Image (cartoon, helix red, strand yellow):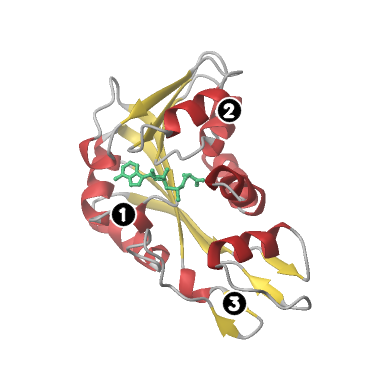
């Protein structure tokens, strides 16, 4: 399974909290937004579908290889602009109405620095949405998931995100955690198998790492 396939699976299983977050902030036509750590662009595409032709989506990722993936996925959306940049050096041509980061902070060196740059990219009164996991709260039957993975520096970053944003002066307006659950087979089981590379018993109940969503506004 390629990284792109894995991202597609993630998009399947974590789509609901993404859509809920976009509904709660009232994202609509004409918004200028940034998807930080855009990966293969699934979040960018969801954003582009809602901001329409009068809006703009900056899809930012540190990895230059992501640009092509995002471009191919977002080819129907002319308003998606791919930017190869580290979030720690974020410098967009304009302040945006919303910065969105999903599964980004778990892999950065300093979540505090990354959060400060996120906030700096938003206009006053604009929206900040962070969606990050609590990996150790995932389960295969009654076994907790291992948090040992090379790319993941902060496996339980989800639990830290409310304080990170509040300490940085963001007005928190909404937060919740949501964990996809699967049994036996299906996208949740496939996703977990490919994440952990451990065999999963065929009658297992799996609980994916809960995704903590924190929604706030810049003062
Ligand atoms: C786990 S993927 C998440 C992708 C996407 N947000 C999603 O939810 O499917 C993390 C992405 O963040 C990017 N990334 C990691 N560190 C970064 C940084 N410091 N600045 C910008 N992007 C970064 C990686 O290249 C990768 O594409």
Tell me the residue that label 1 is attached to: 165
Q: What residue do we see at 51% from left, 23% from top?
A: 71
Helix, strand or loop at label 3? It is strand
Q: Report the residue marked by disc 2.
A: 73
Can you see residue 59? Answer: yes
Separation (CA) of disc 1 from disc 3? 27 Å
Q: Residue at x 43, y 28 (%)?
A: 67
The x, y position of residue 159, in whole percent, is 40, 68
Instruction: Note whether 189 is above or below 173 in the view shown.
Output: below
Q: Residues within 10 Å of mark 1 (few under 14, many from 20)?
A: many
Q: Secondary structure at mark 1?
A: helix
Residue pointed to by mark 3? 139
Q: CA gap, disc 3 to disc 2?
A: 32 Å
Q: Quadrant of the C terminus?
A: top left
Label 3 with label 2: CB-CB less than 8 Å: no
- How far apart marks 2 and 1 lie (CA) works out to 31 Å
Q: Along the horizontal axis of the image, is 217 left or right of 102?
A: left
Task: Work out whether residue 195 or residue 134 is closer to the camera in this orientation and state it.
Answer: 195
Q: Residue furthest front?
A: 1
Question: Where in the figure is residue 90, as x and y percent of width and height?
Answer: 25, 34
- At x 67%, y 72%, the residue is 206
Identify the residue at image location x=57%, y=19%. 75
The image shows residue 70 at horizontal and vertical percentages of 50, 29
Residue 119 point in image, percent of width and height: 28, 41
Counting residues from the start of the chain, the first of labels 2 and 1 encountered is: 2
Question: Which residue is nearer to you in this view: 47 or 218?
Answer: 47
Of badges 1 and 3, the one in the foreground is 3
- Residues at circles 1 and 3 in contact by the CB criterion of under 8 Å: no
Is residue 203 toward the left or the right of residue 211 in the image? right
175 lies above or below 140: above
Q: Classify mark 2: helix, strand or loop.
A: helix
């Amino acid at each position: 399974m390629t990284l792109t396939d894995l991202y597609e699976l993630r998009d399947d299983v974590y789509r609901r909290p993404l859509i809920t977050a976009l509904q709660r902030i009232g994202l609509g036509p004409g918004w200028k937004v940034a998807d930080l750590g855009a990966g293969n662009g699934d979040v960018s595409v969801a954003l582009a579908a809602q901001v329409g032709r009068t809006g703009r989506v900056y899809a930012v990722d540190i990895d230059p290889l992501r640009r092509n993936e995002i471009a191919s996925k977002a080819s129907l959306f002319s308003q998606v602009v791919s930017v190869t940049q580290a979030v720690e050096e974020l410098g967009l041509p304009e302040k945006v109405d919303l910065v969105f980061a999903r599964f980004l902070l778990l892999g950065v060196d300093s979540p505090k620095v990354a959060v400060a740059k996120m906030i700096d990219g938003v206009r006053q009164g604009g929206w900040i949405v962070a969606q990050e996991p609590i990996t150790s709260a995932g389960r295969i039957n009654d076994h907790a998931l291992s948090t040992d993975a090379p790319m993941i520096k902060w496996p339980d970053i989800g639990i830290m995100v409310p304080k990170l944003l509040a300490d940085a002066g963001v007005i928190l307006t909404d937060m919740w955690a949501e964990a996809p659950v699967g049994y036996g087979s299906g996208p949740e089981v496939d996703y977990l198998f490919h994440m952990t590379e451990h065999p999963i018993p065929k009658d297992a109940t799996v609980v994916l790492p809960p995704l903590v969503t924190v929604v706030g506004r810049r003062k």
